[in-house]
Image: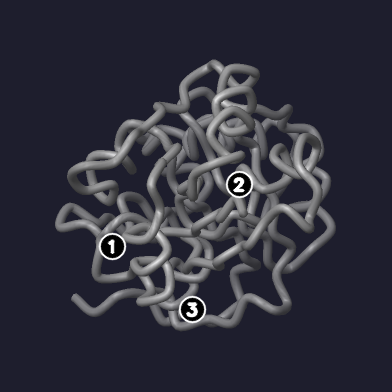
Amino acid sequence: MLTVVGVGPGSESYLTPLARQAIDEAEVIVAGERLLEAFAGEGKSTFVIKNNLEDVVNFIKKNLKEKKVAVLASGDPGMYGILNFLLRHFSPEQMEVIPGISSVQLACARLRISWHDAVITSVHGREIKGLVDLVRNHDKVITLTDYRLTPAVVAQELIAAGVVGKKVWVCQNLSYSNEFVREFSLESLAKSPGYPGSVMVIVNYEHKVGGPDE
C-alpha cells in the first residue's frame, strides 16, 4: 500500500496524529528535501522529489512490492498537490490518502473568514489569465503563488487588466515563526518586494475580514 500523507502547512504542530503514525510506520519516505528534513526521522530509506517525477514513480514501484512507502505532501495532497500526479501512475486501490491542513485553510483561519464560498485556484506553474478572469467575476478568490508569479506580479497583472475594487491579504510562511500576514491594496502590493510562495486572498472592498491580532 502506498500512503500519501498530507503533513500540513509546515510546522510539526499542525501534523495530525494519523499522519505522524503513517510516517513512523513507513519504511520508505518520498518527499521534497524540506519535508524529509522536517518529518522523515532516522533509519528510513528516503528519496528526494526534485524535477525527477519519472524517477519518483520508478522508485515507488520498485519499493512498493515489499515495503511500506509513504509520499509526503505539504498541506493537503489533494489541494494542488502530488495526489493528482500519483493517480496517473497508481490505482486508487493501491493508495491510502491521509489529509492534511492546507495553507488555504490556515490562511482563512488567520483571517477569520470562511472558505466554502471562495474560488480556490493556483498560479503555481500556470498562466495568469485564468486568475484575472476569476478575480474579475467573483467576490472572493484564493490563490497559491510561486516564485515566478509572486503576489506582486499578480497584483501588477490585475491592475493592467483593469481590475478595481479589490483588497488583498498576503499570507506567507504560515505556521512558522516568521509567519507574515498583511493586507494590501492592489496598488501597494504591486510595488512590494513580491512575497513569493504565498497564499493570496483577494476580496471585494466591502467584504469583512478579521485579520491577525496585532
Q: Which mark is residue 175?
A: 1
Quarter the N terminus occupies: bottom right
**Residue 109 is drawn in which quadrant?**
bottom left
Whether the residues at callouts 3 and 2 have beta carbons within 8 Å, the answer is no
- Looking at marks 2 and 1 on the same chain, the residue that comes earlier in the sequence is marked by 2
Q: Secondary structure at mark 1?
A: loop
User: Does residue 162 lie above or below 76 as drawn?
Assistant: above
Which x, y percent locates residue 46?
35, 33
Of badges 3 and 2, nearer the viewer stands 2
| Residue at horizontal 70 percent and vertical 40 percent from the top | 86
| Residue at horizontal 41 percent and vertical 28 percent from the top | 47
For mark 1, does the 10 Å Cα neighbourhood hold few (<14), some (14 to 19), or many (20 or more) residues?
A: some
Q: Secondary structure at mark 2?
A: loop
Quarter the C terminus occupies: bottom left
Which x, y percent locates residue 90?
76, 42
Q: Secondary structure at mark 3?
A: loop
Residue holding disc 2: 81
Q: Amino acid at mark 2?
A: Gly
**Residue 171 is drawn in which quadrant?**
bottom left
172 left or right of 119?
left
Q: Amino acid at mark 3?
A: Val
Of badges 2 and 1, nearer the viewer stands 2
Q: Residue furthest front?
A: 66
Q: Disc 3 and disc 1: Cα gap in Å?
A: 19 Å
- Looking at marks 3 and 1 on the same chain, the residue that comes earlier in the sequence is marked by 1
